[in-house]
């Protein structure tokens, strides 16, 4: 099984986004499940495009967007 999990880059003038930092520390494999982590830009159209590319490339069973 493959899970794709996304987090947004920092908003505005912030230096970090806690949600993104949380997914970065996840293991790449949890209980036999591959974890694919994707950082999305906080620009609407660009984030959709990057998510679509990741979906096509990875073909995950589950997608979690935080």
Image (cartoon, rainbow, N blue to C red):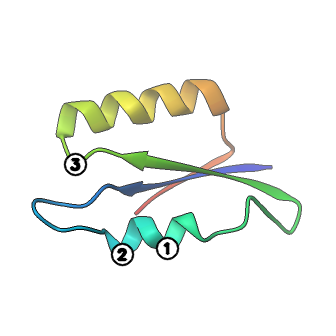
Numbered disc 2: secondary structure: helix
In the rendered view, would you say 37 is above or below 59? below
Mark 2 lies on residue: 18
Distance in Å between CA atoms under marks 1 and 2:
6 Å
Residue 24 horizontal side relative to residue 27, left or right: left
Mark 1 lies on residue: 22
Residue 20, image x and y in percent?
Answer: 41, 64
Residue 45, image x and y in percent?
Answer: 21, 31
Numbered disc 1: secondary structure: helix
Residue 4 horizontal side relative to residue 29, left or right: left
**Label annotation for residue 42:** 3
**Label annotation for residue 1:** none
Residue 31, image x and y in percent?
Answer: 86, 69
Q: Are marks 1 and 3 in contact (CB under 8 Å)?
A: no
Q: Are marks 1 and 2 in contact (CB under 8 Å)?
A: yes
Q: Residue furthest right?
A: 32
The residue sitting at 10% across, 63% down in the picture is: 13
Numbered disc 3: secondary structure: loop
């Amino acid at each position: 099984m493959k899970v794709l999990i996304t987090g947004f880059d920092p908003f505005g003038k912030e230096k970090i986004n806690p949600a993104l930092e949380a997914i970065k520390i996840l293991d790449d494999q949890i209980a036999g499940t591959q974890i694919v982590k994707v950082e999305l830009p906080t620009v609407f159209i660009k984030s959709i495009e990057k998510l679509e590319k990741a979906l096509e490339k990875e073909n995950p069973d589950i997608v979690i967007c935080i």
